[in-house]
Image: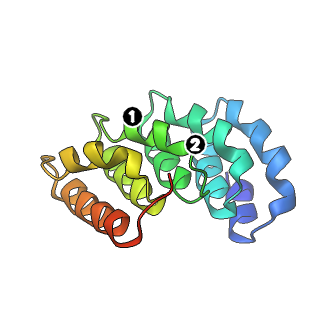
Amino acid sequence: DRAVRALGEGRVHAAVPRLLRLAADSDSHVQQALGWTLGQLEDPSALPALEMLARSPNEHLRSEAAWSLGLIHEPKAAATLTLLAGDLDEHVRGGAVCSLGRLRAASAVARIERAVHDPSPKVQDAAAWALSRIARTGSPR
């Protein structure tokens, strides 16, 4: 997993096709590093791999995917992020709501507004930030 993270730290974009093959790796540490790295590389072709990680039973993988989906700037990620915003894990919810704000996903405003009343203060803060970002800049999405 260190090698995978090093590619993200070095912004080695040429490695994306090989990295995408690691999404099916059985080692959750490798998958978590992959999720982080794909976000750092901001490559929209990572969407299917990140969506696969977002469906994992492992909350750490879902959390990493939620965060990284907002970094790849792919509007199609909003549907997955909207689902993750209702996850049982507060870190997943917070990452998803924040990413929806990064994407300026106006289609998810109703879901983000529900997150304002989340039991987790971190999710509430993420929701307030996301709503202000969407309202401040508008969205074609």
- Examine the image and state in which quarter residue 51 appears: top right
Q: Which mark, residue 76?
A: 2
The reply to whether residue 90 is in sight is no
Secondary structure of the residue carrying tag 1 is helix
Asked which quadrant contains residue 8, the reply is: bottom right
Picture disc at residue 128: none
Q: Residue at x 24, y 54 (%)?
A: 123
Residue 20 is at least partly visible in this image:
yes
Left or right: residue 123 compared with residue 3: left
Q: Position of residue 31 (x, y in %)?
A: 62, 41
Quadrant of the image occupied by residue 89: top left
Dot 2 or dot 1: first in sequence order is 2
Q: Amino acid at mark 1?
A: Leu
Taking the spot 66% from the left edge, 60% from the top edge, the residue there is 42
Question: x, y percentage for residue 110?
Answer: 26, 44
Callout 1: few (<14), some (14-19), or many (20+) C-alpha neighbours within 10 Å?
some
Residue 83's disc number: 1
> Under tag 2, what secondary structure?
loop
Q: Position of residue 121 (x, y in %)?
A: 15, 58
Left or right of 123 in this view: 121: left
In the image, 40 versus 104, the foreground residue is 104
Residue 101 image position (x, y, % from top left): 39, 60
Which residue corresponds to the image point at 17% horizontal and 51% vertical from the top-left? 120
- On screen, residue 73 versus residue 135, left or right, reads right
Q: In front: mark 2 or mark 1?
A: 2
Q: Residue at x 74, y 38 (%)?
A: 22
**Residue type, mark 2 in image:** Lys
Q: CA distance from mark 2 to mark 1?
A: 13 Å
How busy is the neighbourhood of tag 2: few (under 14 within 10 Å), some, or many (20 plus)?
some
Q: Is residue 104 above or below residue 91?
A: below
**Total of numbered circles in the picture?**
2
- Residue 102 drawn above or below residue 47: below
